Image (tube, rainbow, N blue to C red):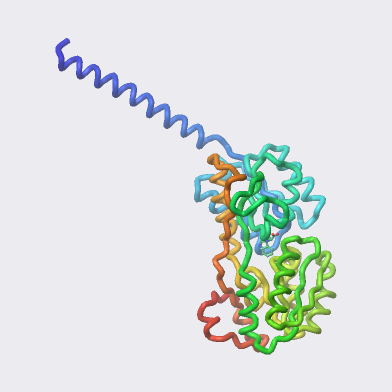
Amino acid sequence: MNNRGKVFTIVLIFCLIFGYIVENRNNNEEVKQRTDVKVGVLQLLSHPALDSIYKGFEDEMKNQGYEVGKNLKLDLQNAQGDQSNLATMSEKLVSEKNDVIVAITTPSALSLSNVTKDIPIIMGGVTYPVEAGLIKSEEKPGTNVTGVSDRTPLDQQLSLMKDILPNMKKLGIIYTSSEDNSMKQAEQAKELAESLGLEVVVKTISNTNDIQQVTEVLASSVDAIYVPIDNTVASAMSTVVKITDSYKVPVFPSADTMVKDGGVLAIGVDQYNIGVETAKVVVDILKGQEAANKSIVFANEGIIYLNEEKAKELNIIIPEHIKNKAQVIN
Ligand code: TRP
């Protein structure tokens, strides 16, 4: 063989080896893509906000290449607001060896973290994960829990309420005593409202059965009502608003969906976007990141949501500077 022949042969062998490596790599990637990932979801109950979070989550998983029926097994468990359902469903999701479990709401995350300290739990909309005892710090969770918080800027919300209702003297707050997330927010709101010179009346409910009576008591004695990001109240907004409307008392809630359901105004978080952000965290974890080292994401864009029709109905004039910044949802 002459020199040219040798060079040619060597190049040919190189090409064959290179081709083999590349081909094998592709095959491996295909195998990886084809392998099903198992994701469980534990949702506390159905109300418009939580359903939006789930929808955003499912859509973004698809955007990221994880699709049900192709490479994703998705097991959604809805506890219908029942604590014992939460416990059984947590056991089920853990024993079925999901790769990751998404917890929509604080009670779901708490229930899951009682059952597993290994499988990553990704929070979809938990307001105070440190205070709830789920993680050690928001920068570095240090546990198998991480994800998205839906905390809203309470100080801004209260000062907006003051701007809108300059004559407001008495503020009511209603929340569910078993929801840590709302208790914390209610405490903070009370403190802030008092520092603005308001008299504050706080009332708690145990479940939706109490809503009618407690709202009635509040609505008959206050100028406005603030509702934290409370799951039970969110699921019964129509009952709340029916009563408050009859007293012409405005409700200031904490989520876009609750404004849509008859609240007047909130600085809140786009619930669908919480779901989108949650899916991004899930994908990072599936790709090998550690929950313990992954800091909490804040889905808080500080958007002002305004129900203009409701404001009109209650004869409330929204100052121009607020209206200009607000996103109107009726
Ligand atoms: N933040 C709530 C929790 O920690 C769950 C939640 C998310 C929620 N979005 C909401 C509650 C909207 C009421 C309204 O449990």
Q: Is residue 70 visible?
A: no
Position of the C terminus by quadrant: bottom right
**Spot occupied by residue 193 in the image (x, y as percentages of width and height):** 70, 78
Position of the N terminus by quadrant: top left
Q: Residue at x 70, y 54 (%)?
A: 43
Left-right relation of 280 to 211: left
* Number of marks drawn: 0
Left-right relation of 207 to 231: right
> Picture quarter containing residue 183?
bottom right
| Whether residue 178 is situated above or below residue 294 in the rendered picture | below
> Picture quarter containing residue 74?
top right
The picture quadrant for ligand 1 comes to: bottom right
Left-right relation of 236 to 149: right
**Spot occupied by residue 85 in the image (x, y as percentages of width and height):** 79, 50
Q: In the image as oriented, which residue stretches furthest toward the top?
A: 1
Q: Is residue 85 visible?
A: yes
**Spot occupied by residue 22 in the image (x, y as percentages of width and height):** 37, 29
**Spot occupied by residue 152 in the image (x, y as percentages of width and height):** 62, 67
Q: Residue at x 55, y 53 (%)?
A: 59
| Whether residue 93 is situated above or below residue 168 in the rendered picture | above
| Whether residue 87 is situated above or below residue 170 in the rendered picture | above
